[in-house]
Amino acid sequence: MRVTALRAAALAGAGFVLRILIAPSHGYGGVDGDLVEHKQMVHVALEQGFHEIYLANALHDPALTGRDWDGAYFVNQPPVVHYLRVGTGWLYRLFSPAGYALWPSDLNFLEAQKTDLRERLAASRGFTVALKIPGIVADALITLGLYFFAAKQAGERTASLVAGAYAFNPGILFDTAHWGQHDALAVGFLVLGLMLIHGGRLEAGFAVAILGALSKPQMNAFWPLLLALGLLRFPLSRVVRAGLAAAGVALLVFSPFIFGGTLGITLDALFRSTFGGEPYLSCQASNVWWLLSGGRGYDINDNLPLLGPLTARTLGLLTFLGACGLVARRLAGRADRDATLAFLAAAVGGASFFMLSTELHENHMMAVLPLLAFALPGEPRLWPVYGLLSVTFLLNMALFDPAVVDPLGVRLGTPIPVRELSLLVAAANTAGFLALCWRFWQRTGPASPASTSS
């Protein structure tokens, strides 16, 4: 056991150090991307109160104003990650008050681009690293969980391969350490929730899983599966209690807004930013909609009628829910002690959401990779799928990052054909998605009499 723990710690530690070395990079577009707004959010939380972090949205968020973004501060991510980033931001302020002072909430990004944005970025790299820490820590914890889970299922060698395939996955590194996205934090809560449910602790599983949904709204796509697992494996009374436990956690998360009198604007901002906040077929996500639009998904409104009142947004949602229903039906009657099947089902659900839903971004496929990794020890035939989706995940992000493609084009002496390459990535994603669904279909073949009776 001691050797196992040391190997797990070594892999997680190496991945952590590698991410810390990458973290000072300037992220999306070479300007820190969304982290600029999160730096300003830290200012609002520390100087005005956490309950006010969403108040500016009504003035500046395009989802609420109906106008193009004017460069002023707003945030549209759920609050769990903000709690953590306020904590690491507070620590940064202790060590570098001058760097912290460079990002007040009244700073206008578009105006700063014309003046001293580069200087502000260069003088506050520590602030950027501080905001990336929650995702980096989450990656390390996922690596540890993968190692122990795989070691128990398939031995030390497989555990090292699986944990290493996540810890040093180039796409995960790009997403967490370079861009500073907190997908790992959200999916970490989901993984822990699935583990708890598999261990018979449904109430705790739902309570943890809701933290994932309150970290990134895309994690709500996994609730059909969570509910299906609850209803298939537990009495209805347990499912009701689990739902109440999740509601209790949500109330706790939103308690500052309740007591601060800003719950209404907060929920309005989050809801409207999540549903129809960017009403396009695909916000550069290399999925089915990107293919169907010929790589012009960001040019087509997803709320335009396709057939009568049926819109692309509605069609995407209906096909995703249909896929969830099919997954739930295939799970019915199967052995409830098959953890591999639970993670494989979650990976199919996550991939279905990414491939079939509209309004998604490049990095929103990230959750599929750790879920697949947890399925690998029990289903080694998934390795080619994991490898393919890892490559397409990285390319989907890199192709749409001007800080990557513009310098590369200069070095090669010719512009990078982003749209054409992205269509190839979308086609590869579709192939990987179909292969993943096929593996799930094979594993959920006719149930044995023993599993049916249980």
Image (cartoon, rainbow, N blue to C red):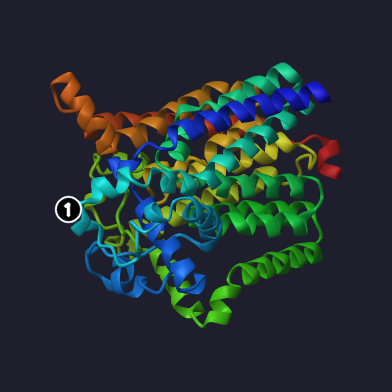
Say which element carries label 1: loop
Q: Residues within 10 Å of mark 1 (few under 14, many from 20)?
A: few
Residue 394 point in image, percent of width and height? 40, 31
Q: Which amino acid is tagged 1?
A: Thr
Residue 433 visible in the current orientation: no
Q: Left or right? Give the position of 360 relative to 167.
A: left
Q: Is residue 163 left or right of residue 396?
A: right
Query: Residue at position x 35%, y 53% from top?
Result: 36
Q: Quadrant of the N terminus?
A: top right
Residue depicted at 69% across the width and 19% down the height: 158
Task: Single out the residue that lies furthest toward the top.
Answer: 157
Quarter of the image where one finds residue 362: top left
Towards the viewer: 62 or 243: 62
Of residues 70 and 449, the one nearer the viewer is: 70
Give the x, y percent position of residue 43.
42, 64
Is there any visible trace of residue 68 in the rendered image?
yes
Q: Position of residue 300 (x, y in %)?
A: 23, 53
Viewer-proximal residue among 160 and 238: 160
Instruction: Identify residue for label 1.
Output: 115
What residue is rendered at 55% in x and 30% in y?
A: 17
| 236 relative to 437, above or below | below
Picture residue at 20% right of the left edge, 28% below the top: 416
Quadrant for the C terminus, please.
top right
- Most extreme residue toward the bottom is 261
**Could you say where residue 4 lies in the image, as x and y percent from the top left?**
77, 24
Q: Quadrant of residue 344?
A: top right
